[in-house]
């Protein structure tokens, strides 16, 4: 199955609510590669690489996020997978 990369920009109450840790758990459970990191202005960036159907499951999870999160907006851009990405990490 062909792989695809999705880069998400997530806005709302997504910092200080363990969004990155929960996103990593979800990505590993789904077998995706990539990373998640905090950005300025209380935003989170997540990059998922894997089969499109599975990446879309991760995106759907991010629309809700962990229990204390309040996601107000997600933008998604699609691209070619990066072969250098291995595993799924939290970047600082």
Image: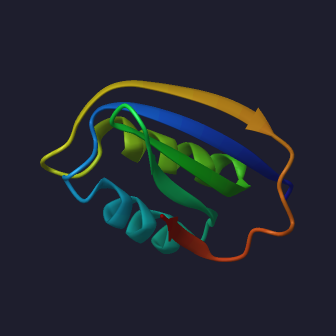
Residue 82 position within the rendered picture, expressed as x and y whole percent measured from the top left: 83, 58
The residue at the point 28 percent across, 42 percent down is 14
Identify the colour scheme used: rainbow
**Residue 7: x percent and y percent?**
64, 41
Image mark count: 0
The furthest residue to the bottom: 87
Residue positioned 53% across, 49% down in the render: 46
Is 89 placed above or below 36 here? Answer: below
Q: Please name the residue shown 38% across and 46% down the image.
A: 61
Residue 62 location, quadrant: top left
Q: Position of residue 70 (x, y in %)?
A: 20, 34
Q: Determine which quarter of the picture holds residue 87.
A: bottom right
Q: Nearer the viewer, residue 67 or 18?
A: 18
Up-down relation of residue 51 to residue 74 (above or below): below
Give left or right: position of 82 versus 76.
right
Say whether residue 50 is left or right of residue 25: right
In the rendered image, the residue lying farthest to the front is 40
Quadrant, the N terminus: bottom right
Residue at screen point 56% across, 38% down = 8
Report x, y in % for residue 54. Answer: 60, 54
Q: Left or right: where does residue 6 sit relative to residue 67?
A: right
């Amino acid at each position: 199955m062909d792989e695809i990369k999705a880069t998400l920009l997530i806005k709302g109450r997504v910092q200080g609510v363990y969004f990155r840790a929960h996103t990593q758990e979800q990505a590993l459970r789904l077998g995706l590669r990539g990373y998640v990191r905090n950005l300025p202005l209380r935003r989170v960036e997540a990059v998922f690489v894997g089969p499109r159907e599975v990446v879309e499951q991760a995106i759907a999870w991010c629309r809700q996020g962990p229990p204390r999160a309040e996601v107000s907006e997600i933008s998604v851009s699609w691209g070619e997978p990066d072969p250098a990405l291995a595993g799924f990490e939290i970047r600082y």
